[in-house]
Image: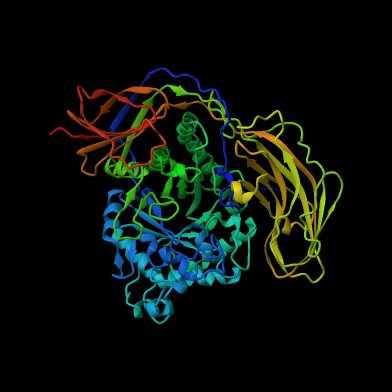
C-alpha cells in the first residue's frame, strides 16, 4: 500500500505557485457569442438554503496556531466575542452583524471552527458564567446566535481533544446536552435545563472531526489518525451519538483538496461510509498569488469552476464505489488558494461565486456549503474590529449579497451554448484543451539528491547513518522533542528557469522498529521544504506515517514549489513525541522526480443558473462569463415565463485585484418575444430578475 503526502499537514502546503513565467496566453476575439435558454416550467430541484453557509472560529487556538503555553486570554476574540458575532457585555448577538448577515441570507453556521475543533472540549464552554470565565461565548451562546441569524447550526465534533477511547462518550453527552429532554435519565440535559435552557435545541448536523488526516497540530499529546484509526473513531462515535438521538445527520471527513482517489478516502469510505449521512470535503483554490501576472491569475480563476465540477463528479463516483451507495457531499470549507492578500479581491469573489453556483445545482448533491470564513480575524471578508459595527467589507462580499438577492426557491432547467475556451498549462495548473482529461504524470528520470548531510542531527537523542546511495537510518534514543533536521539539498536545475514552479514527486520506503520497552509515539516521516526555509516561504510538504510501518512500506508526496524557489531540502520529521521515544527508523529508495499536472478538457465560456420564487412570479438568472479577455454577446431566451422585462446587476471590475467593496452596475432589461441579448463583460457575474406579466 502506498502512503501519500498529507497535503494539509502544514498551514500552506498547496498555496505555492502554479504559474510559469512566460506562459502563452492566446489572444481572444473582442466579442464572442453565446445563448442561454431558461425553461421555467422544468423544475430541477429546490434551492438548498444550507448552501449559503459560513464558518465561525470560536474555540481555543493554543497548541494549534499559537503556543500551548500562552494564556487563554489570547483567544478573547473567539471565546468571548464569538469572533465578533457576540457582545459579551449585553450577552446578545451584535445587531450590526446580524443586519449584514441578513444581506447574505446566512443559512448555516459551522462551529467551533476547522482545526480549532481538535482542541475543543464542549463541556468547558457551558454552565454559569462564573464557572467558565474564559468562555463567555460558548455552546449555548452559539445556539442563540444561530437562532438570531435564522441559521442552521453545524457542530464539528472533536477528533483529538481527549484520548480516542473517551471520544464516543464525550460526543454522546454533547448530543444529550443539545437534544435530549431534561429528564433524570439524561443528566446533561438536566444540567442544560438548570442553566436556563429547558427545551432541547434539536441540533441535526454534526461533523465527525475536521481534516483529521493531518493530526492535531501541536496539541499535547500529539496524535495523527491513520485512516483505519479514524474510521474506528467515526464508527464508534456515530453509534454512541445515535443511541441518544437517531435523527441526527453525521458526516465523515475526506482528505481536503480536489483529489478524491487517495488511500485515506478509500479506507474511510469503505469502513465508515455505512454510518455516514454525508461526506465532508474542503475545496481551496484556485491558487492565486500577487507575484504573478494579473492575466495569468485571471486565467487560472476562470478555469476553476469547470475543474471543481469535474472534482465533484469524481468524488461521487469514488463514494459510490467505496460505500456501495452515493452520499451527499458537504463542502464545509471553501475559498480561494492560500495566498492571503488575494482572498479579498474581486477575482477571489468571482471564483467563490461560481462554487456557489455548482453547489446550488441539484445534480451535484451538495448538502451544505460553508465559506471560510465571513467575519473578522485573518480570513474575514467583513470586519468589525470588535467595535459592534461593520467597519469594512471587501470585494467578495458583493458576490454573496448578489447571490442572496438573485436566487429564488426552485432551480429550473437552464441550457447554455457557448464557445469552448482553451488555456495553456501554467506551472502546476494544467492545460484546458481538447475533449479528455489526463491524470498527473511523472516524467522519467530522477533528480540527483547529492551526498546526505548529517550535521543537523542531534547526536545525543537522534543519530543518523547513511545507508547506501539513497538510504538513511535514524536511531532515536530517549528523544522527547520534535525534530526537523535537513539532510539533503537539491538545487533548481539550470534547465528550469527561475520564475517557473517546480513540480516534484517524492517517494521512499520506510520501516520503524521500536526499541524494547518503548511506549512513546510520535508522527514520523520525511518532507520537502523550500531551500530558503519554512519561516521565510511557508512552502513545504510533509509525508507522514512512517511510525506505523513495522515492515517496509512505500510513501509518496507531491510538491509544487514557488516560482522563485532556488531549490529544496529533504527534511526528516518527528512531530509531537509523547514521552521519550526510542527505536530505529529506516528509509530507502529515496527518489525525487519531476511530474506534469493533470490536464482538463476545454471548458464552456458561459455558465448559468436560473431559479423561480416560491409563488412563481419572479424569475432569477445568474450568468458567468469565464472568458478572461472577451465580452460575450449572449442571447437569453425565456421559455415558459411571460414577462416584458426586468433588471440586471453586473459585477465586473477591470482590475481583478481590487479589494474594495463595490455595489455593481445596475440596469434595465427589455424582453421582446421571450428573448433579449445582453453582453456579458469578461471575467464577470451578471444577475437578472424578471417579473411575470399579469
Percent across and percent down for residue 200 are 35, 70
Please, is residue 552 above or below residue 191 in the view?
A: above
User: Can residue 244 be seen from the camera position used here?
Assistant: no
- Quadrant housing the C terminus: top left
Residue 491 appears in which quarter of the rendering? top right
Lateral position of residue 413 relative to residue 443, left or right:
left
Residue 657 appears in which quarter of the rendering? top left
Question: Which residue corresponds to the image point at 41% horizontal and 29% vertical from the top-left?
Answer: 626
Task: Report the coloring of the rendering.
Answer: rainbow
Lateral position of residue 397 relative to residue 425, left or right:
left
Q: Which of 99 and 608 is in front in this view?
A: 99
Percent across and percent down for residue 625 are 38, 29
User: Can residue 454 be seen from the camera position used here?
Assistant: yes
Question: Which residue corresponds to the image point at 42% horizontal and 26% vertical from the top-left?
Answer: 627
Percent across and percent down for residue 195 are 35, 78
Q: Which residue lies furthest to the right in this view?
A: 468
Q: Which residue lies furthest to the bottom in this view?
A: 184
Percent across and percent down for residue 27 are 47, 19
Question: Which residue corresponds to the image point at 42% horizontal and 76% vertical from the top-left?
Answer: 132
Residue 84 appears in which quarter of the rendering? bottom left
Please, is residue 412 above or below residue 239 in the view?
A: above
Report the number of numbered marks. Answer: 0
Q: Residue furthest top?
A: 29
Lateral position of residue 468 relative to residue 443, left or right:
right
Amino acid at each position: 500500500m502506498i502512503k501519500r503526502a498529507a497535503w494539509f499537514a502544514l498551514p500552506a502546503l498547496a498555496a505555492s505557485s502554479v504559474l510559469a513565467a512566460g506562459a502563452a496566453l492566446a489572444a481572444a476575439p473582442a466579442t464572442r457569442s453565446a445563448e442561454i435558454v431558461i425553461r421555467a416550467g422544468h423544475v430541477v430541484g429546490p434551492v438548498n438554503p444550507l448552501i449559503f453557509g459560513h464558518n465561525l472560529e470560536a474555540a481555543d487556538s493554543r497548541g494549534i496556531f499559537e503556543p500551548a503555553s500562552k494564556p487563554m486570554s489570547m483567544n478573547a476574540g473567539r471565546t468571548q466575542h464569538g469572533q465578533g458575532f457576540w457582545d459579551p457585555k449585553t450577552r446578545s448577538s451584535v445587531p450590526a452583524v446580524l443586519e449584514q448577515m441578513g444581506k447574505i441570507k446566512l443559512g448555516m453556521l459551522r462551529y467551533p471552527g476547522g482545526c480549532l475543533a481538535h482542541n475543543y472540549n464542549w463541556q468547558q464552554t457551558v454552565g454559569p458564567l462564573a464557572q467558565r470565565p474564559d468562555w463567555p461565548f460558548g455552546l449555548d451562546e452559539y445556539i442563540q446566535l444561530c437562532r438570531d441569524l435564522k441559521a442552521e447550526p453545524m457542530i464539528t465534533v472533536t477528533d483529538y481533544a481527549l484520548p480516542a477511547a473517551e471520544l464516543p462518550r464525550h460526543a454522546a453527552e454533547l448530543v444529550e446536552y443539545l437534544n435530549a429532554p431534561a429528564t433524570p435519565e439524561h443528566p446533561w440535559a438536566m444540567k442544560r435545563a438548570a442553566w436556563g435552557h429547558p427545551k432541547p435545541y434539536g441540533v441535526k448536523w454534526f461533523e465527525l472531526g475536521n481534516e483529521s488526516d493531518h493530526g492535531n497540530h501541536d496539541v499535547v499529546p500529539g496524535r495523527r489518525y491513520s485512516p483505519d484509526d479514524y474510521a474506528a473513531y467515526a464508527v464508534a462515535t456515530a453509534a454512541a451519538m445515535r443511541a441518544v438521538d437517531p435523527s441526527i445527520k453525521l458526516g465523515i471527513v475526506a482528505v481536503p483538496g480536489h483529489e478524491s482517489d487517495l488511500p485515506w478516502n478509500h479506507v474511510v469510505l469503505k469502513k465508515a461510509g455505512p454510518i455516514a449521512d454525508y461526506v465532508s470535503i474542503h475545496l481551496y483554490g484556485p491558487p492565486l498569488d500577487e507575484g504573478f501576472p494579473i492575466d495569468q491569475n485571471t486565467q487560472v480563476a476562470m478555469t476553476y469552476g469547470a475543474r471543481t465540477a469535474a472534482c465533484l463528479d469524481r468524488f461521487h463516483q469514488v463514494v459510490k464505489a467505496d460505500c456501495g451507495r452515493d452520499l451527499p457531499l458537504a463542502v464545509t470549507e471553501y475559498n480561494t488558494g492560500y495566498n492571503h492578500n488575494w482572498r479579498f479581491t474581486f477575482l477571489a469573489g468571482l471564483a467563490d461565486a461560481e462554487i456557489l453556483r455548482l453547489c446550488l445545482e441539484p445534480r451535484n448533491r451538495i448538502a451544505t456549503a460553508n465559506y471560510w470564513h465571513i467575519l473578522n480575524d485573518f480570513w474575514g471578508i467583513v470586519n468589525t474590529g470588535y467595535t459592534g459595527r461593520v467597519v469594512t467589507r471587501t470585494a467578495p462580499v458583493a458576490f454573496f449579497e448578489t447571490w442572496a438577492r438573485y436566487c429564488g426557491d426552485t432551480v429550473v432547467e437552464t441550457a447554455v451554448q457557448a464557445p469552448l475556451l482553451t488555456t495553456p498549462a501554467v506551472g502546476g495548473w494544467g492545460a484546458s484543451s481538447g475533449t479528455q482529461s489526463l491524470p498527473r504524470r511523472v516524467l522519467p528520470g530522477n533528480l540527483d539528491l547529492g551526498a546526505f548531510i548529517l550535521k543537523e542531527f542531534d547526536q545525543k537523542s537522534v543519530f543518523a547513518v547513511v545507508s547506501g546511495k539513497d538510504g538513511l537510518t535514524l536511531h532515536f534514543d530517549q528523544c522527547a522533542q520534535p525534530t526537523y533536521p535537513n539532510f539533503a539539498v537539491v538545487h533548481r536545475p539550470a534547465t528550469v528557469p527561475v520564475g517557473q514552479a517546480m513540480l516534484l514527486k517524492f517517494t521512499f520506503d520506510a520501516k520503524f522498529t521500536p526499541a524494547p520497552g518503548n511506549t512513546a509515539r510520535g508522527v514520523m516521516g520525511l518532507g520537502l521544504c523550500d531551500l530558503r526555509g519554512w519561516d521565510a516561504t511557508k512552502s513545504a510538504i510533509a509525508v507522514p506515517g512512517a511510525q506505523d510501518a513495522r515492515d517496509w512500506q512505500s510513501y509518496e508526496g507531491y510538491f509544487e514549489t514557488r516560482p522563485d524557489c532556488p531549490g529544496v531540502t529533504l527534511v526528516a520529521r518527528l512531530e509531537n513525541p509523547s514521552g521519550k521515544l526510542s527505536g530505529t527508523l529506516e528509509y530507502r529508495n529515496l527518489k525525487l522526480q519531476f511530474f506534469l499536472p493533470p490536464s482538463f478538457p476545454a471548458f464552456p465560456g458561459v455558465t448559468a443558473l436560473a431559479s423561480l420564487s416560491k409563488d412563481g412570479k419572479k424569475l432569477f438568472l445568474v450568468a458567468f462569463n469565464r472568458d478572461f479577455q472577451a465580452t460575450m454577446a449572449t442571447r437569453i431566451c425565456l421559455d415558459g415565463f411571460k414577462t416584458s422585462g426586468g433588471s440586471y446587476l453586473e459585477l465586473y471590475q477591470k482590475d481583478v485585484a481590487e479589494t474594495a467593496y463595490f455595489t455593481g452596475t445596475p440596469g434595465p432589461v427589455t424582453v421582446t418575444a421571450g428573448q433579449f441579448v445582453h453582453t456579458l463583460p469578461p471575467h464577470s457575474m451578471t444577475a437578472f430578475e424578471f417579473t411575470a406579466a399579469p
